[in-house]
Amino acid sequence: MDYRTKILHTGKDRDPYTGASSIPIYQVSTFAQNDPVEFGQYEYGRGTNPTREALEHTIAALESGTSGFAFASGMAAISSVLLLFQSGDHIVVAEDVYGGTYRVLTTLFNRWGLKYTFVDMTDPQEIEAALLPETKAIFAETPSNPLLKITDLGAVVAIAQDRSLLTVIDNTFMSPYLQRPIENGFDIVIHSATKFLGGHSDLIAGLVVTKDEALGRRMQSIQISFGAILGPQDSWLLLRGIKTLSARMEAQQKGAEIIANWLADQPAVKAVHYPTLTSHPGREIHMRQASGAGAVVSFELQSGEAAKEVLRKAGLPLMAVSLGGVESILSYPATMSHAAMPRSERYARGITDGLVRLSVGLEDPTDLCEDLARAMEAGI
Amino acid sequence: MKKERANIKTILAQGGARWDDKTGAVSMPVYQTSTFSHPALGQSTGFDYSRSGNPNRQVLEELMAGIEGGARGLAFASGMAAIDCLMRLFRPGDSIAVSEDPYGGTFRLLEKVYRPTGIDITYIDTSQLAHVERALQKDINAIIVESPTNPLQRIADIPGICGLAKAHGALVAVDNTFLTPYFQRPLELGADIVLYSATKYLSGHNDVLAGLMVTKDKDVGERLYSLQNSTGAVPGPWDCWLTLRGLKTLPLRLERQEQNAIKIARWLAAHRSVKKVHYPGLKGHPGHQLLAEQSTGFGAMISFEVEDPEMVRRMLSQVKLFLFAESLGGVESLITYPAVQTHADMDEEARERLGINDRLVRLSVGVEDVDDLIDDLTFAMGG
């Protein structure tokens, strides 16, 4: 079955009771029982809800995993995964990980004794060098945010397997349509489903998929205990969004390719980061492990002032935090996604004040290029 | 002796609660779906396509039919869509009598859409049985009654009208929006059809547009269902779900709203700037006794006339709690100016004759604290 078909037919995509082509929204907190001892399949909405269950089944199938879990946000998903670890454990984390992940590690989990080392994961030797006896996991993100640096999934898995480490990846930028890390051997895949999976900038949600069932049972226990679950209405909207994932990703990626190539020719642009550009150092690895470059482009202008001017003058893309929606979004990592990172840390990672990130939506790419051209002219 | 059926409060509170025996979900799921897949060729789960039937709409329709004591419930995209569906039962040459101060939207539909098709429409004072009898002499096909009327709160003798209509073979439809089945059940009083703008008290939160209709007779219900399915003015699943959710608190809301309304009506009656108060719960109201016989409550709609139209303008601009808005029946109190809002489509002469003049104000009393509401009116009316 072609993956585009699979997206629409994962086995739990319709209501088994009425045949409703769209899973009903079970806007309910509790389920009445027939027996005081033998409970039915559903008891209480935090534990399971049929609408959320359909979503969880869908994402597990789409990521080629065994168990799926839906959370109230991408950060709730990441935090729930981090609860797998305990005091004294150490994890190796990609240095240009999403700013929210950086914040939760350095300001919350560190208080409970979870240790971490940030490394440049594009270099497997750096991962090796960071490993400690108490290292329990490697947390990757590829392409990275916002520099779209590429990590070799196979290399990470090889290092982890040698030492029985858990491999975790934030797959938000690619979505399972373009990259399925469990097929490369990863144990846990995380999504901010607010982005490409939801795709309409109308919900906040996070998803987790585990490769094996034992790990799935541990995640389920965390999900029930911690309770950062996704509500039925949002679960339903997310399922609705996923139905058009392939169509959206293809169109948005096509637009991003056109814009990335156009940006590369602009004199005002110092550098363009987009995984399939011939100039991109991770191009070959990325094309081996993913079926496309996605729809996020970042580019660097001469200065922070020039970048801010483009953000102010651009008329078509929305200036906002977030990405992955049908509307193009222009954001400024220095004050938005990476505001939680100190300037020195940020610069060490190459996230300069001149960097702008564009999440390409469904608008006509020529319209977007013309709009950016006007904004850049104004900035010169 | 076993009761024939549970109290309306019980039925409403548990609306939809036992529908989903597959999962036991206490709140029924929202079937946000357009179509239903079939188990096999020639088989159906009972649902095929959401215009023809959707679980959320079905539960709402059946609940309403149950509490009204009718054979068939039908839900619509708005109250006007419900009345429109009713009117499609008639054809050119048919003749309809209607309460003379109907809701402005009903008046507009009848005048702008149905009169031009050749349906004869007569407006009668349905609070006078003699007027009804006179109209029936002219071979009327149906009478559409509003009681209490909007905004003047005139009360029709529903059993009396139904008795006369039956003798002449005319259908009686009652727009029961103001009282709801919690206070008044027209089918039990002899009517053939009861109609609602469910946007008002039934959903009760000023957050849904919906219409409902219940027929006493199964065949009339089937004819109307065929019209509903053909013209397709159905409410979506989410709106049905919200209406069902609203219905669960209908008794609580109406009791509180009515208590508030009685207190406000009495306060208005004693106010020096108020010329007339139209509220059937007041002993001096001409329909008070009649309504007490056919209903268990007087509702929460009040209209009143002040001495000076300037006072109306002042009130509308000075109220802080009452929202100046069209509609009624929600938990928030609303203040309306019928002459320019709900009855703007009625010509001035007709309005003046009926008493819907530029000094008349209508209140839909909500569930706020009644003393706060009175303070608000006191301030708005100039202390």
Image: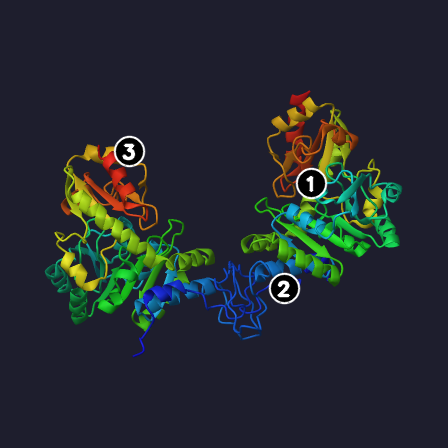
Name the foreground residue: A207 vs A331: A207
Amino acid of disc 1: Gly
Nearer the observer: mark 1 or 3; the answer is 3
* Helix, strand or loop for disc 2: loop
Name the element at disc 1. helix
Which mark is drawn over residue A255? Answer: 1
Whether residue B233 is visible, yes or no, is no
Q: Position of residue B277 (x, y in %)?
A: 17, 46
Q: Please say if A90 is above or below B64.
A: above
What is the x, y in percent for residue A19? 55, 67
Residue A378: % across, % down: 65, 22
Q: Which mark is residue A217?
A: none
Closest to the camera, between mark 3 and mark 2, is 3
Q: Quadrant of the N terminus of chain A?
A: bottom right
Q: Is residue A143 left or right of residue B314?
A: right
Considering the image in quadrants, where does the C terminus of chain A appear?
Answer: top right
Residue ID at (79%, 46%): A90
**Residue toward you, A165 or B122:** A165
Q: Position of residue A80 (x, y in %)?
A: 67, 51
Looking at the rendered structure, the secondary structure element under dot 3 is helix
- Residue B287 placement: quadrant: bottom left
* Residue kind at label 2, given as amino acid type: Lys
Q: Label 3 is found on which chain of the structure?
A: B
Subunit of mark 2?
A
Q: Which residue is mark 3?
A: B318
Same chain? Circles 2 and 1: yes
User: Residue at point 18% right, 39% down?
Assistant: B359
Q: CA distance from mark 2 to mark 1?
A: 32 Å
**Which mark sits nearer the N-terminus, 2 or 1?**
2
- Residue A12 has which mark? 2
Of the pair B325 and B330, the residue shown nearer to us: B330
Mark 3: give few (<14), some (14-19) or many (20+) Cα within 10 Å. some
